[in-house]
Amino acid sequence: MDSDGHVMLTDFGLAKEIDELSRSNSMCGTTEYMAPEILMSKGHNKDADWWSVGILLYEMLTGQPPYTHANRQKLQQRIIKEKMKLPPFLTSEAHSLLKGLLQKEPSKRLGSGPGGGDDIKSHKWFKQINWKKLELREVQTKFKPEVSGEDCTANFDKCWTAMPPDDSPASTPTSGEHFQGYTYVAPNRWLSPEPT
């Protein structure tokens, strides 16, 4: 959330850019958010991202992801086979959007057709959103955090801000079969020149 209250999804710590017709076979990320096609190693494309958006939306609306289990293999089987349970306290519009985003068959998933993300943006759950004004930040937010500047951490729990800043013991992988197609290289702030 920025200082004006606008929210952005981030956390693309591991992301891979592929062209529209390609598929990736990489398996990385948090299991609860992985699409069935990733878990079954069928190859995936951006349709898997719409699944993850659906999982995140479900969690934001209910407080937990739709598929959980302490055992990773059982969790994967639930994601692949189990029917999603939608809480009755959600609106019919929310049910419809979640059902569309959390289709187990990627080609039937909302956002997978030729309209892509525009099909999601035009869903009835978003009917009150003016996407152009939102993108231009012309929409008044309902919550504006109190911050003292760009680097203010007052709204973060102290358990995170009090942690010592430890350097990662692992080096950034630059080659090898596991990271083909990835271009990210972790910045080394210790070797960066001091700002003047």
Image (cartoon, grey):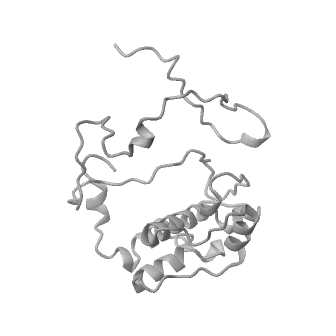
Question: In which quadrant of the rendered view does residue 83 lie?
Answer: bottom right
Question: In which quadrant of the rendered view does residue 6 lie?
Answer: bottom left
Residue shown at 72% from the left, 63% from the top:
71
Q: Position of residue 151 (x, y in %)?
A: 32, 34
Closer to the camera in the image, 91 or 174: 91
Report the label total: 0
Residue shown at 66% from the left, 75% from the top:
105
Q: Position of residue 176 (x, y in %)?
A: 78, 35
Instruction: Judge left or right: residue 23 versus residue 139.
Output: right
Relative to 154, say whether 169 is above or below.
above
Farthest right residue in view: 177
Instruction: Judge left or right: residue 74 versus residue 91.
Output: right
Question: In which quadrant of the rendered view does residue 195 lie?
Answer: top left
Relative to 157, say whether 173 is above or below.
above
Closer to the camera in the image, 28 or 128: 28
Residue shown at 22% from the left, 60% from the top:
139
Residue shown at 34% from the left, 50% from the top:
1
Instruction: Judge left or right: residue 162 versus residue 24.
Output: left
- Where the C terminus falls, by quadrant? top left
Closer to the camera in the image, 154 or 117: 154
Q: Position of residue 136 (x, y in %)?
A: 27, 54
Relative to 195, say whether 85 is above or below.
below
